[in-house]
Image (cartoon, grey):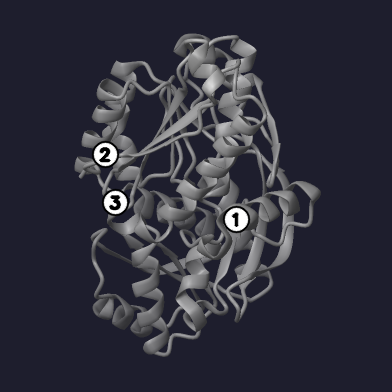
């Protein structure tokens, strides 16, 4: 459902209003309720920081930025309401958000009809193609191979059991994983799904234990399903090499001891040792203090996307959607993850990190893969 009073963050300076130039409004439809509610607050914080920083330096083309945040309830029905309100009611200039695939797919017709630029900041199953849609997060071609290669080559895994949420992301990720496992000489001995809002994994875990695989790979709806599945796997004594294709560092920290040992492949971890990432982390800590949510692979792309939109507007010299869409694949931003440019069929090459969750919830990086190409995502996009 749409928030009864959408969160409006308008940091507009009096001089901008005096000149008659209202703010440039960024719509952020995100799952403040539902499956994504665990991670959504960190995404909102990242957007707030980017807007705060940009406005402190004069805004964009002399205008301030404002955020309008709406709850999409992490699903299709909520997304339709949220996008409809933001595009047609609030008339936002751009949409920048992390959402479930179900929410994204339901919203795209509204985006197309409203002709609003939409930067999608969530890792996802890939191949979502729309002239208004740009993606600065990873796809399976970038994320899955490091995990499977490590499990087969370094841990001797030959058989795999796959567990997911029954929707586009869960099935899409595991379909790619299965194909890659088999291409690499491994075998999938089980594949099980629960609905997005499912929370009782007992029967799935029973099938997992009966199959006796060498490793398990999961791909859930993120947030709450990650927590329930991992907790129940640990309680059942599952001690296999375990990779989660949907967990972010923030959610891992919220799991506590249950997350220890999970392998993940991400385009962002807090331990990235660069000046840009250290500056970002310091700015987050300063702005939010004790209320700060752990920056992660879902929130950092949100922060960078606001800056990418700023660069596109400045290059276009206007917020006109057609001009901004033309500029988006030609601009870049040097952020916490490095240089981000959405020039590969509206997707971005990304440096990927293979890591393992430690006892304190942090991620220890085992391997780094520079500038991994997203592959052929939208070859027919015009």
Numbered marks: total: 3
Residue nearest the viewer, comparing 290 with 69: 290
Q: Is residue 138 left or right of residue 315?
A: left
Where, quadrant-wise, is the N terminus in this rendering? top left
Q: Which residue is mark 1?
A: 266
Residue located at (45% from left, 57% from top): 178
Name the N-terminal-most of marks 2 and 3: 2
Which dot, 2 or 1, sits closer to the camera? 2
Which dot, 2 or 3, sits closer to the camera? 2
Q: Is residue 205 left or right of residue 338?
A: left
Residue 161 image offset from top left, x and y in percent:
42, 71
Q: Residues within 10 Å of mark 2 (few under 14, many from 20)?
A: many
Answer above or below: position of 269 versus 69.
below
Residue nearest the viewer, comparing 161 with 303: 303
Question: Helix or strand or loop: what does disc 2 sit on?
Answer: helix
Question: Helix or strand or loop: what does disc 1 sit on?
Answer: strand
In the rendered image, is residue 148 in sight? no
Q: Which residue is mark 2?
A: 79
Residue located at (55% from left, 56% from top): 288
Marks 3/1: CA–CA distance: 21 Å
Q: What label sits on residue 167 in the rendered view?
A: 3
Name the N-terminal-most of marks 2 and 1: 2
Q: Is residue 335 left or right of residue 136?
A: right
Q: Residues within 10 Å of mark 1 (few under 14, many from 20)?
A: many
In the rendered image, is residue 364 in sight? yes
């Amino acid at each position: 459902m749409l928030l009864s009073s959408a969160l409006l963050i308008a940091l507009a300076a009096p001089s901008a209003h005096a000149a008659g130039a209202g703010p440039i409004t960024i719509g952020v439809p995100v799952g403040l309720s539902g499956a994504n509610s665990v991670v959504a607050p960190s995404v909102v914080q990242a957007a707030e920081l980017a807007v705060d920083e940009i406005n402190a330096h004069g805004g964009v083309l002399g205008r301030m930025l404002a955020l309008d945040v709406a709850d999409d309830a992490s699903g299709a029905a909520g997304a339709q309401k949220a996008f409809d309100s933001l595009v047609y009611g609030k008339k936002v200039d751009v949409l920048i958000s992390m959402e479930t695939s179900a929410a994204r797919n339901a919203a795209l017709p509204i985006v197309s009809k409203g002709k609003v630029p939409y930067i999608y900041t969530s890792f996802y199953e890939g191949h979502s193609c729309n002239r208004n849609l740009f993606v600065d997060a990873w796809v399976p071609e970038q994320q899955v191979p490091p995990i499977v290669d490590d499990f087969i080559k370094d841990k001797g895994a030959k058989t795999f059991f796959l567990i997911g949420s029954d929707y586009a992301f869960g099935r899409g990720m595991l379909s790619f994983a299965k194909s890659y496992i088999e291409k690499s000489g491994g075998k999938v001995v089980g594949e099980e799904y629960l609905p997005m809002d499912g929370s009782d994994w007992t029967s799935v875990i029973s099938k997992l234990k009966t199959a006796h695989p060498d490793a398990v790979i999961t791909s859930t709806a993120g947030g709450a399903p990650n927590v329930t599945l991992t907790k129940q796997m640990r309680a059942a004594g599952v001690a296999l090499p375990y990779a989660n294709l949907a967990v972010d560092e923030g959610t891992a920290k919220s799991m506590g001891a249950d997350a220890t040992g999970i392998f993940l492949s991400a385009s962002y971890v807090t331990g990235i040792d660069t000046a840009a990432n250290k500056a970002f982390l310091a700015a987050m800590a300063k702005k939010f203090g004790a209320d700060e949510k752990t920056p992660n692979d879902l929130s950092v792309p949100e922060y960078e996307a606001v800056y990418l939109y700023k660069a596109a507007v400045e290059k276009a010299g206007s917020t006109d959607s057609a001009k901004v869409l033309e500029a988006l694949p030609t601009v870049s931003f040097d952020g916490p993850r490095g240089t981000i440019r959405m020039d590969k069929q509206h997707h971005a090459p990304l440096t990927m990190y293979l890591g393992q969750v430690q006892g304190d919830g942090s991620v220890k990086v085992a391997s780094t893969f520079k500038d991994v190409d997203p592959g052929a995502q939208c070859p027919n996009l015009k």
